[in-house]
Image: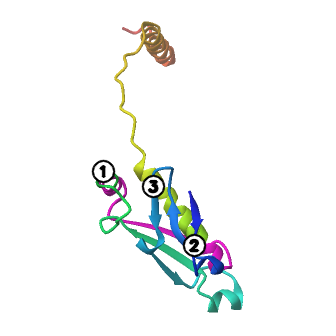
Amino acid sequence: MQLSDAEGPNAARGRRRELRVNDELAIRVNEITLRTSRSSGPGGQHANVTASRVEAIFDVPASQSLSETQRARVLARAGPRIVAVAQDERSQTRNRELALERLAERIALALVVPRNRRATRPSNAARARRLADKRRAAQRKLERKPPPTGDD
């Protein structure tokens, strides 16, 4: 997951054009909504006046970067909107980078195809160990009982 540099007039200002999610997918940054707000928690005067918290929002159904199969998988696993928030740093620029990285991680996780589970059966040794443990537990409980009295 890395941000690729832009070509042209925005390159000098450090603007990014696309967010690289994995080897097959790069999302154009104009498909991601970035919102800023004041960060929560301590920080004194600086935190009280600076909008350093960044929220990155990716609208899955409206995306042009995702193929139909990718869109279906992300919708099924992560929902129609994927949100990543960063307020760790004092700098809005650094929080923007962190939010985009976290967004890329969430999208990458949603795109992972889960492996099919193969049904397995316990081995004979495992079955024997389980039964032996049950016998030991039953014996332990029998030993906890008080001895029989001779009044019967």
**How would you rate the neighbour count of disc 3 (Cα within 10 Å): few for under 14, some for 14-19, many for 20 or more?**
some
State the residue position of label 3.
Answer: 25
Mark closer to the observer (2, 1): 2
- The quadrant of the picture occupied by the C terminus is top left
Q: Is residue 72 above or below residue 146?
A: below
Q: Which residues are magenta?
A: 71-96
- In the picture provided, is 146 more to the left or to the right than 4? left
Give x and y (percent) for residue 100.
54, 67
Question: Could you say which quadrant of the image residue 127 lies in?
Answer: top left
Q: Is residue 87 visible?
A: no
Badge 2 vs badge 1, beta-carbon distance below 8 Å: no
Q: What x and y, as percent, mark residue 74? A: 35, 55
Residue annotated with mark 2: 7
For image coordinates 57% across by 77% down, the residue present is 8
For the residue carrying disc 1, how many other residues have a C-alpha within 10 Å: few (<14), some (14-19), or many (20+)? few
Give the colour scheme of this rendering. Answer: rainbow
